[in-house]
Image (tube, rainbow, N blue to C red):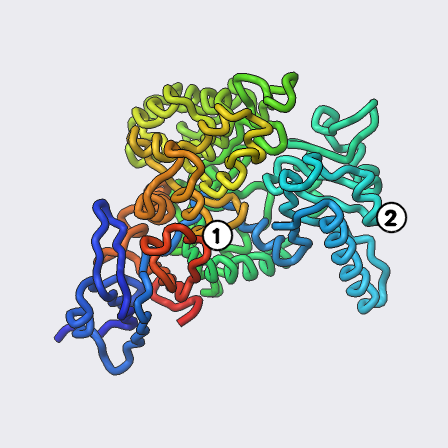
Amino acid sequence: MTEAADLLLTGAEVHALTDPDRTAEAVAVRDGEIVRVGPEYEVRFLEGVETDVIELDGGVVLPGFIDAHTHVQLLGQYELHADLWGIESRGECLDALRDHAAELDAESEDADSPSDDWVVGFRYDESAWDADRPLTREDLDAVSEDRPVAVFRIDVHSASLNGAALERLRDDLPESDVRTESGDPTGVIVEDALDVLWEHVAPDREDARELLVAAQERAHRLGVTGVHDMVRNTTLPWAYRALDREDCLRLRVRLNYWADHLDAVSEAGLAPGAGSEFVRTGAIKSYTDGAIGSHTARLGEPYDDNPEEHGQWVIEPDELREIVADAAASDFPVAAHAIGDAAIDAALDAFENADAALEDPNRRYRIEHAELADDEQIDRMAAAGVVASAQPNFLQWAGEGGLYDRRLGVERRKRADRFRGWLDAGVPVAFGSDCMPMDPLYGVDQAVNAPTDAQRISVTEALRAYTYGGAFAAGDEDRLGTIEVGKTADLVALERSPWEHSEAIDEIGVALTVVDGDVVYGG
């Protein structure tokens, strides 16, 4: 007699997102594994007395979304600090920070002790404001002159500080990454200077656990069942493993450790893929350059709105080659952040320099972002099997008259994030969010409705990049990323079909999220 299933999802259009895509009417799950996919009458044979049956009333079932590039600590910070996403003016931004400061004051009064806690904000984006200039020390002094105030730009490659914060950090900030005007700090810091700031505002273990719980809940509401987390100098790996030991983690995590942790990771025996069902070691992460919005992405030609500026190296090409070689010696692939065309060249050179490692098909080298890849670089990526780990939500800045037009000019703006060209060339593509924002359906909408033909891909291709693509990038395609018998039951149900509502995919709601066969949201 066939053993009954634990969970049936019925009344739906099931998309396996295999290549080619296959559809069905229902899915059966037992012990966290998909055991049947097919017509509803057939799947119903596995219904038993204790089987949970969820009728989806015409919804769409997909593999769970895998965010292939994110920073879960930031996602939790947005829940617990001032989240400035979507604020449309400088004045509104400063008002939100003042409100947050007042909340901190009220909390300290309740505790009968004065507070000099940092006032911290995240995800401000000045590109949509009337004056496209970052927040300054003068702006933030209007929030507080006594307490340190720090606000991270949405790309987290620059931040703005008030006078009190500058004074507190002054002796430790690298001079080259502190922006000045007439010799005085403007309050804007970039790249390595942010490491100093993080030391003061990063969560301790107790806070990291709280952040992770909040972030996990938010991820589930968005249909995210797995993440590739880029972790550096953070207690989040401890928090992941603490929740995992307590059987409270319901998010599959690949920890991509920063290059400065390589020796420690190797000595601890954390080989790629090592770990538990939910927490596994991924690649070694490194930078090359910064970000377009902060003028720190490394370009071959100067910025259109600053002809003296080509961006900067966060990690010099020679050092990157050493990192890739050292990682290969420890059997680790590398995920290299590279946005500008000059930076992409540096990453590909470093990967090709470790050509013996590239010959291992199970070692997935990745370029994170790869936004301004030219035709030759795309061909090199395809030939070497290098994964393009991309963020389709970055296209929010690629419209006519948008940020990329101003920073890069029209020609380079149209060349950014050419997903159609990548796929046609045979480049493996994995989609992630970089938390700008973490919302797979928003990213899918951006890719499907992109500004140019070279950027625009089909609904199926975009969804595959956010499911199978992430699984492939981590070497997990045998267990995750598609809906097939024998694979892990990580699933998401949408309220409407993205194929039938392709003009507004970002408005489609998530009805249900299932991780390891357990309903973690909706239902």
Under tag 1, what secondary structure?
loop
The numbered mark at residue 146 is: 2
Looking at the image, residue 66 lies above or below residue 259: below
Determine the residue located farthest toward the left in the rendered image.
1
The amino acid marked with disc number 1 is Asp
Mark pair 2, 1: CA separation:
36 Å
Q: How many marks?
A: 2
Looking at the image, residue 156 lies above or below residue 441: above
Q: Position of residue 88 (x, y in %)?
A: 66, 48
Residue at the (48%, 43%) spot, across then down: 393
Left or right position of 7 against 399: left
Determine the residue located farthest toward the bottom in the rendered image.
49
Left or right position of 34 against 184: left
Quadrant of the drawing holding the N terminus: bottom left
Would residue 476 be visible to someone looking at this image?
no
Residue at the (82%, 53%) spot, across then down: 116
Q: Position of residue 335 (x, y in %)?
A: 45, 34
Quadrant of the drawing holding the C terminus: bottom left
The numbered mark at residue 439 is: 1
Q: For residue 381, what is the image quadrant? A: top left
Q: Earlier in the sequence, mark 2 or mark 1?
A: 2
Residue at the (59%, 28%) spot, across then down: 407
Most foreground residue, 212 or 449: 449
The amino acid marked with disc number 2 is Asp
Most foreground residue, 470 or 89: 89
